[in-house]
Image: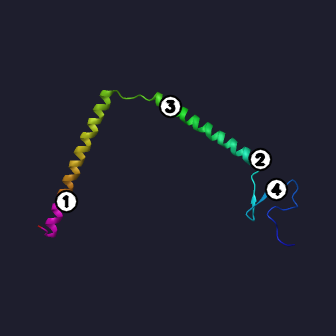
């Protein structure tokens, strides 16, 4: 009972891939069913992309966009909060630096 081959001969109706020789090396060729399956998968992927974009555009149409006045007001509010937080963190940094310098005797 020697070795067991990858494609056993004892199985009836076993599907054997076509073999070819490429540069002295055996290669397994692609059969038609596999190429048809790849084409169908490609079509499904293409359909999925179209559906994604169609749904995205539909969602964007349903968005309630702010008016120019609302957008301006909210932008100014963000800039004020950002500036005040920057000043607050800067003051904490300067204060901590001064306290550490005093504690370590650097001044």
| Mark 3: secondary structure | helix
Q: Earlier in the sequence, mark 2 or mark 1?
A: 2
| Residue depth check, mark 1 versus mark 3: number of the one nearer the observer | 3
- Residue 106: % across, % down: 14, 68
Residue at image x 88%, y 56%?
Answer: 12
Calculate the distance from the C-alpha at mark 3 to the C-alpha at mark 2. Answer: 38 Å
Q: Which residues are magenta?
A: 95-106
Please state if 67 lies on the left or on the right of 94 as rendered: right
Q: Residues within 10 Å of mark 4 (few under 14, many from 20)?
A: few
SS under mark 1: helix
Residue count near mark 1 (Cα–Cα under 10 Å), binned few <14, some 14–19, many ≥20: few
Task: Please name the residue that numbered disc 4 is placed on.
Answer: 16
Earlier residue among tags 3 and 2: 2
Q: Are circles 3 and 2 on residues that touch, CB within 8 Å?
A: no
**Observer-nearest residue: 10 or 42?**
42
- By secondary structure, the bulk of the magenta-drawn segment is best described as helix
Kind of element beneath mark 4:
loop
Read off the residue under disc 3: 57
Q: Which residue is mark 2?
A: 32
Judged left or right of residue 19, residue 43 is left
Marked residue nearer the N-terminal end (1 or 4):
4
In this view, 71 is above or below 93: above
Image quadrant for the N terminus?
bottom right
Q: Nearer the viewer, mark 1 or mark 4?
A: 4
* In the image, residue 89 above or below residue 80: below
Q: What is the x, y in percent for residue 13?
A: 87, 53
Identify the mark at residue 96; answer none if there is no mark: 1
Instruction: Tell me how far mark 2 sits from mark 1, CA to CA.
Output: 73 Å
Q: Tags 3 and 4 in contact by the CB under 8 Å rule?
A: no
> How far is the residue under mark 3 from the one under mark 4?
47 Å
């Amino acid at each position: 009972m020697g070795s067991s081959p990858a494609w056993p001969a004892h199985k009836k109706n076993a599907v054997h891939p076509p073999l070819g020789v490429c540069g002295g090396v055996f290669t397994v060729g692609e059969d038609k069913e596999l190429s048809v399956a790849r084409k169908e998968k490609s079509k499904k992927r293409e359909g999925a992309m179209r559906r994604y974009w169609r749904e995205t555009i539909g969602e964007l149409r349903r968005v309630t966009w702010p008016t120019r006045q609302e957008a301006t007001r909210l932008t100014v509010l963000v800039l004020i909060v950002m500036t005040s937080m920057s000043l607050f963190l800067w003051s904490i940094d300067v204060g901590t630096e001064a306290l550490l310098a005093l504690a370590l005797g650097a001044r």
